Amino acid sequence: MQSYRRERERAAQDPSGFWLEQAQRIEWVDRPTRGLDDSGAPLYRWFPDGTLNTCVNALDRHVAAGQGGRVALIHDSAVTGTVRRITYAELLDSVSRFAGVLAGQGVVRGDRVLIYMPMVPEAVIAMLACARLGAVHSVVFGGFAPGELAVRIDDARPKVMVASSCGIEGAKVVEYKPMVDAALERAEHAPDVCIILQRPQALASMGARDRDWHELLADAQPHAAVEVSALDPLYILYTSGTTGRPKGVVRDNGGHAVAMAWSFENVFGMTAEDVWWAASDVGWVVGHSYIVYAPLICGATSVLFEGKPVGTPDAGAFWRVVAEHSVAGLFTAPTAIRAIKREDPDGLLLADHDTSSLRSLFLAGERLDPDTYEWAGAKLGVPIIDNWWQTETGWPIAANPRGLEPLPIKAGSPSVPVPGFDVRVVDPTGEPVEAGEQGAIVIGLPLPPGCLPTLWGDDQRFVDSYLSAVPGCFSTGDGGFLDPDGYLYVMGRTDDVINVAGHRLSTGSMEAVVAAHPDVAECAVIGVRDDLKGQVPRAFVVLKAGSRIDPETLQEEVVEAVRDQVGPVAALKRVVVVPGLPKTRSGKILRRTMRGIADGRPEPAPSTIDDPAVLEAIAPLLQE
Ligand code: COA
Ligand code: AMP
């Protein structure tokens, strides 16, 4: 563990010096002379006197270095049966011109642009065009419905929205434009214009506020990159918290660029020569960091895959992509591998493809279960590398640092804290626990570059949500333990956030929708175990006195409402009517106790339970 230990100690003893050294990986306009700015502690900032442009780092500098002919993006669209290769020079041209389009609509440094698009190159072009102007993008995942979109519009207050007419989900065309219109009807804030990318699979009807992507681009002039402060926000990415109100995670320009450059090489062991594929979605943090920014900042080739691991056309899709594009590193969620394993347990479709280019498979987004780990390792014959992180950090907190020094792999553990992250496991009083003992996972401040400096427009919420439980530490919301070798085991969330097919969702936002049903008196949505998706939400509802609704109608209406307001990605399918909900004497619903029973791992009910008979009455319903 020599190189790893050395780098970890250097980053811990002199964070400023360590990260200033790593900052040399980036092209600055004004090179920073200071690393960490702790003057606003517990809010920390990185590289306060540096200026740069992130788009220049992702595109211009590679073209200027003579690499314009290299392929930057491979758009492999299994759902349309097309493959499009875009070089760095071509991408720079499109991005500069789309930056011209946005500037023509009045977008300037600091303005927000909300992007609601499927996995098409135009999503990446729009993101980088914002970065070029110093505007702040906020990408919303296409699986979120108008209700969630509206909340994000009102929080980010975008000047412009960029959307696609549709996405393609397997054999199904999902129209995005009606969802944009419905969201704008619900939102209080109104962007000046919506730029719509018309896809032939479903042409959108255009309203007074709408402009056509292609028409605007045809007349556009390239726009130069705008110099921004390292501290300027690059993007806002909303993520689920325990309440229905999503948290606007802010990413700065300087620290982010440095973290992307460092982690792509040191954590993932990738270089500019490699074809890299993060099989996620641009709407999630994995997509931001490892489909778009890290591989492009490092000058590598990034695969943008539009399709599913199964069904487009079959469970061999991933292996076809690896073979066809000579992918060296693949990053996805365990659920994708479980889906493939379910369809092709013997790996027969895998055997049809030459996947010898693959050096490692990286998995994250949810706990990597031993079966999936073993199956993937046996079938692919490459190291299976778990890594643990979250939207808030933007890059891995714990991983097996393949580039720095490959360490022994232990099944069930994402491995060791990445240099820069002071990972601790603490008890409810905030005191560190012994090795092997479970507790809350926290990170000693300051967080390294690239992690969220704050929540959008709400420093106080940032402090209250993350920095207050354990003084001097950032609370991750996950629980787990460190073993005697310093390997971290992440066991799951300690709050009511759930993880459905690698997607982080708030039960709170689903509860708000369920509770709004006219027949529902009160409800609890909890995550229950699912073989494919890891967890799925299930709603338990108490009906209003006198309600005569039959359970099937109730379920249909509630499921439809959740799809409409939260989105299909929530995957709420079951609604169970119960006579009552177990609560503490102060009225708090005992969700954790309910979860334990539903998962077949019951824990004793807390002594604060109000009426144990209620729990007894619903226990059989929880287990159904
Ligand atoms: N736009 C519109 N709708 C979307 C969408 C998008 N971008 N993404 C998902 N949806 C819809 C799906 O069409 C589906 O709708 P349906 O209920 O009408 O069928 C619903 O949301 C659930 O989608 P999904 O979670 O993808 O489930 P699935 O059953 O279609 O597929 C898996 C299951 C496991 C194959 C799939 O979840 C998967 O590939 N997961 C990998 C996750 C991942 O990459 N996570 C990122 C972290 S690294
Ligand atoms: P997100 O912010 O959507 O990336 O979700 C982050 C959450 O997913 C974390 O807080 C964890 O609960 C979970 N998670 C991500 N990666 C892992 C992993 N490797 N092992 C266990 N849980 C993970």
Image: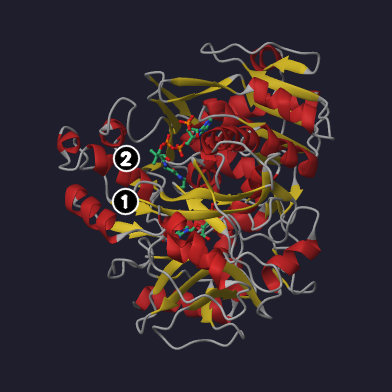
Query: Mark 2 is on which residue type?
Result: Val
Vertical arrangement, residue 35 with respect to residue 106, above or below:
below
Residue linked to disc 1: 361
Residue 291: assigned label: none
- Residue position marked by numbered label 2 in the rendering: 327
What x and y, as percent, mark residue 102? 75, 27
Residue 623 in which image quadrant: bottom left
Q: Which of labels 2 and 1 is toward the front?
A: 1
Residue at the spot x=54%, y=71% of the render? 420
Q: Position of residue 334 (x, y in %)?
A: 36, 50
- The chosen color scheme is secondary structure
- Locate residue 32: give its quadrant: bottom right
Q: Earlier in the sequence, mark 2 or mark 1?
A: 2
Query: Residue 33 at x, y = what percent?
Result: 70, 66
Label 2 crowding class (10 Å Cα cut-off): few <14, some 14-19, many 20+?
many
Residue in the foreground of this view, choosing between 204 and 110: 204
Q: Nearer the viewer, residue 180 or 590?
A: 590
Q: Is residue 139 positioned above or below 367 on the image?
A: above
